[in-house]
Amino acid sequence: MGQARQAPSASLGLVLIALAAVAWGTTGSVMTVLAARAAASPLLVGAARLWIAAVLLLVALLLTADRSHPRLSQATHGPSRPHGSRYSNLGRCVLMGGCMAGYQAAYFTAVTLSGIAVTALVAICSAPLMIAALAPWALGERLTPRVRVALALGVVGTALLVLAPHGALDLTARLGAGALLALAAGLAYALYVVLAKATLARMAPLRLTALTFTVGAVLLTPAVLSSEAPLRQLALGWPWLLYLGGVATAGAYAIYALGLRHVPASVAGIVTLTEPFTATLLGVLLFGERLGVTGVLGALLLCAALGLVLGPPDAFSGRLAR
């Protein structure tokens, strides 16, 4: 009976995570428009999207606070929970905010050093591998053979898909430094996911996401202040920034947290590879990029990986004994 109830929740969780990844996949195209129309600094964009997301999430949290279900409220904030546990949850939110700020700073700095292709390749492909490595140790998740195959197909497919439009790369010290920063961004994201998965058992998704992005926005504020003519950049790019902050950040991460509650972190890492698939599709449709045989093969491998994890949820629901 319990498994029958869990299956729809897991399926809905997968759908929510996939929708979040699709929203994230639009950020590259929006960043291209911002750079062209507003000469927007990548770091300023990262900070602005976090601030917009934080404000919207805090407003949503205030508007829904009094309407929370009593049982949910008691489960997350009730008097029976020790104060130490609340402080522990707050500490995790601070760590997650630091991870999100670190991700933005490392990722966008890497873009300026090694370009979008290398940064996306290293950051996006490394994150699911790191999550899969951390999840058994930190969360007690068991990686089933099906998940391992999906992870391999997804990472290889993503690599082929990302590199296809760009061809061979010139190995330079600048590119190497950018790749290391992209690797740091992948690690920051992986830590965010693992911490979020652990904390969602004790805290409501909206509250968790709102607190996390508020911390991240505060930590990235110096990036706005140090940018050249930040007010001019914000004035020229505000419609696109509102989309990034409201839809691709606040909305996407809110539904991602909802989905992550019902899906193992390792599986969520694979499903988020929908992001580069979306970004590549938009590049082909909007900017005339060509995939070629390599890109098509990568897309097929990625679709196969997603097909594996979007199948019956009981195939990846195993956990290690705690």
Image (cartoon, rainbow, N blue to C red):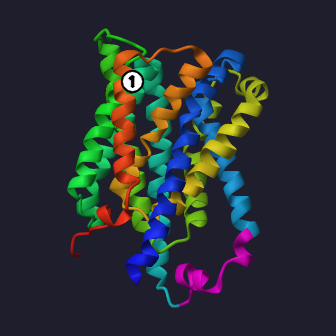
The range drawn in magenta is 64-79
* Residue found at x 72% / y 70%: 64
Is residue 245 highlighted in magenta? no
Instruction: Please state if 47 lies on the left or on the right of 233 as rendered.
Output: left
Is residue 66 highlighted in magenta? yes
Estimate the x, y position of residue 259 in percent, counting from the top left. 50, 60
- Badge 1 density bin: few <14, some 14–19, many ≥20, Cα 10 Å: some
Q: Quadrant of residue 10?
A: bottom left
* Residue found at x 29% / y 14%: 173
Amino acid type, mark 1:
Val
Quadrant that contains the C terminus: bottom left
* Residue found at x 70% / y 52%: 55
Tell which residue pokes out farthest to the bottom in this image. Answer: 80
Q: Foreground residue, 297 or 128?
A: 297
Judging by the rendered image, the residue that carries numbered circle 1 is 296
Instruction: Please state if 25 lies on the left or on the right of 148 as rendered.
Output: right
